[in-house]
Image: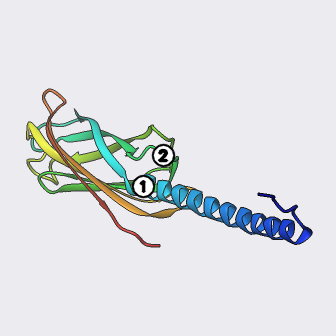
Amino acid sequence: MMTQPQTGANRFRLKKRVFLVIPLVIVTLVAVFAYIYYSMGVASVTSISLDQIQAVRIFGNGNYPNRNATYFIEVQVWSKAEALSVRLDNPVFEVNLSPLVEGNQTLPGGMILAGSYLTYNLRLMVDESRDIGTVSFPNATVFVQMTTHAATTPYSQTVTARDSALWDWNTARRSSRTTDNARKSSG
């Protein structure tokens, strides 16, 4: 069987197909990589969580029921996805100390590097003559909530994360802990 030599028309059709397939492959690859990168950004922002590391009560001056105490709470902010770095814009921390003592604090923003965390130190001052009985308790549940605008390069949203822990003030050790992470989007 003899093969026919390729003519100019056959070569032209082959080149035309190659020139059509190459851009289609490039567009498909770019779209797939863009989707993966965007998904990593979404996962990094929406997986932000809090973890109370330490809480200490230090007495100020005075005696019961006219004394003051300062509560220092150390909180770590994690992006559990660990895929991309996440920028936090001036997070607002709300601290509730049972029974019925609350305060809030706005702290400078920062960057959670991939695979790392940010540490924030919160301070809550309590005047026992105003909040009767609060300082006398040997332990208390501390509720911490953070609201901030979190962003990666391809994605951003407002995030709210919560954590609660029962602290024993005599030993400065955590008795128990529950975590509740909630997210809300504001575009």
Residue 79 appears in the figure = yes
In the displayed structure, 155 sits above or below 168; it is: below
Tell whether 136 sits left or right of 186.
Answer: left
> How far across and how far down the image is residue 86, in percent?
50, 50
In the displayed structure, 115 sits above or below 126; it is: above
Q: Decide: few, some or many residues near mark 1? Use Cα within 10 Å; few <14, some 14-19, many ≥20.
A: some
Tell me the quarter of the picture where residue 45 sits.
bottom left
Q: Which mark is residue 83?
A: 2
* Residue at 35% across, 44% down: 122
> How far across and how far down the image is residue 26, in percent?
69, 61
Tell whether 54 sits left or right of 118.
Answer: left
Quadrant where the N terminus sits is: bottom right
In the displayed structure, 13 sits above or below 39; it is: below
Q: Foreground residue, 186 or 107?
A: 186
Tell whether 173 sits left or right of 147.
Answer: left
* Residue at 22% across, 47% down: 126
Q: Earlier in the sequence, mark 2 or mark 1?
A: 1
Residue that mark 1 sits on: 43
Q: Amino acid at mark 2?
A: Ala
Q: Foreground residue, 172 or 181?
A: 181
Task: Give the alpha-carbon distance from disc 2 to disc 1, as whole Å.
Answer: 8 Å
> How far across and how far down the image is residue 110, in percent?
52, 47
